[in-house]
Amino acid sequence: MKKSTAIILFLMLCLGQQLSAQQNQSKTTPASEKKVMIVYGSDECHHCTDTKKYLKENNIEFVFYDIDKNQEALKEMLFKLKKANISLNNLSIPVIDKQGVIFTNDIPFEAFLKKLN
């Protein structure tokens, strides 16, 4: 009797942990969640303001972080650039995080804008 009770309690504990893990996963990554493009730049940068204008005109959802005013965003941007093996020497902004793909404005600006679509 004690053995069967212990087995039942063990199975209930395991099942409870699986259900809890599934619930936590569904809360953090809902299937309907859409990734939004992140633009790191500065309000003082004409390429950054032109990029924001282009994204708005083309109805592309994005979040803009002004790295001059938001130090956490600057740190996040630098971390992503390092992780993507993008040199910080001669870095040009804006820096784009398009669903995990990181790129900068290091090509002719019109070609850069086409990469945003």
Image (tube, helix red, strand yellow):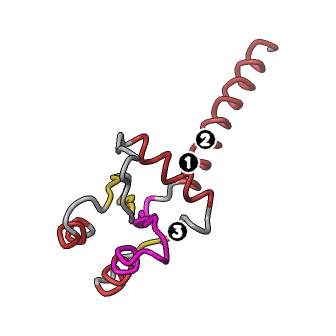
Q: Which residue is mark 3?
A: 65
What's the amino acid at mark 3? Tyr
Q: Up-down: is 45 above or below 35?
A: below
Residue 110 screen position, x and y as percent:
19, 73
Mark 1 Cα-neighbour bin, 10 Å: few <14, some 14–19, many ≥20: few
Sooner in the amino-acid sequence: mark 2 or mark 3: 2
What's the amino acid at mark 1? Gln
Q: Is residue 13 left or right of residue 87?
A: right
Q: What span is in magenta?
A: 31-50
Q: Which residue is mark 1?
A: 25
Who is closer to the viewer here, 47 or 3? 47
Residue 36: say if magenta: yes
Q: CA distance from mark 1 to mark 2?
A: 6 Å
What's the amino acid at mark 2? Ala
Mark 3 or mark 1, whichever is nearer to me? 3
The residue drawn where x is 46% and y is 67% is 41
Dot label at residue 96: none
Residues under numbered marks 1 and 2 in contact, where contact means CB atoms less than 8 Å apart: yes
Q: Up-down: is 11 above or below 76?
A: above
Q: Which residue is mark 2?
A: 21
Q: Is residue 75 left or right of residue 34?
A: right
> Label 2's element?
helix
Q: Is residue 82 left or right of residue 101?
A: right
> Label 3's element?
strand
Is the C terminus in the top left, top right, bottom left or bottom right quadrant? bottom left
